[in-house]
Image (cartoon, rainbow, N blue to C red):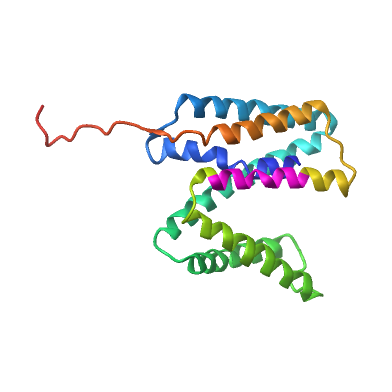
Amino acid sequence: ANATLFGNCATLIFPLYGFLIARAWPTRTQAAALLLAALGAGLLMGRSYQLDARNLGGDLLCLTAGLLYTGYFIAMARARSVMAPLSALALSTIASIAPLLLFAMLLGERVWPGDWTPLIGLALVSQVLGQGCMIYALGRLSPLVIGLALLIQPVVAATVGWLVYGERLGAPDLVGVAMVAAALVLVRRSPPVLAPAPPSPHLKP
């Protein structure tokens, strides 16, 4: 569940993007949400380190994935402002082919599949249907709706881990998950307050 939870921290990083890039100041509610999420994430990562130090490295990789996921959201949101959903999806797919192929070759992974059925299934379900719906939603729905929809993924991951892999979440893990989930909801309750624009040098007082 940690992997999915930290990998989907993009809904928390958007306020930081608004503050640093769009010059939007976070409200008190959003600042409290960021603190709550940081505490919850620290609790989850601390539990991982206590169990096995190797899990901490995995958590950090998932946080990195969340940062990259934020960049993907920002890029696709900008693309959707000038492009249709299918065009934006095609652009993102084509742009990712070369880097993925390069990493696969550097890591010595098998590039040519032995069975095309799983690959075609993943392409149609995950990429065309899943990413296509998300890119469509970026141009049609509010960030609140998208953020809440993303919260379904950690819940599904935890459920699958419990039912299929026999994973068990202790009380600290549940508290950490609840804190991050609450922060993800809280951070979308109010829009950021825009910082006042500096006065124009051409205007006299």
Q: Residue at x 90, y 43 (%)?
A: 166
**Residue extending furthest left?**
204
Q: Nearer the viewer, residue 81 or 148?
A: 148
Residue 22 image position (x, y, % from top left): 38, 41
Pick the quarter of the image with the C terminus: top left
In the shown orientation, is residue 41 left or right of residue 172? left
In the shown orientation, is residue 180 left or right of residue 73? right
62 above or below 26?
Answer: below
Pick the quarter of the image with the N terminus: top right
Look at the image and give the residue range highlighted in magenta.
145-157
Residue 7, image quadrant: top right
112 above or below 77?
Answer: below
Q: Nearer the viewer, residue 10 or 55?
A: 10
Residue 183 image position (x, y, % from top left): 60, 31
Query: Magenta stretch: residue 167 in it?
Result: no
**Residue extending furthest right?**
166
Q: Residue at x 78, y 69 (%)?
A: 118
71 above or below 25?
Answer: below
Q: Nearer the viewer, residue 98 or 31?
A: 31
Query: Magenta stretch: residue 153 in it?
Result: yes
Q: Residue at x 41, y 41 (%)?
A: 21
Residue 163 image position (x, y, % from top left): 87, 47
Residue 173, image quadrant: top right
Q: Magenta: predominant secondary structure element?
A: helix
Residue 92 image position (x, y, % from top left): 54, 63
Count of numbered circles in the view: 0
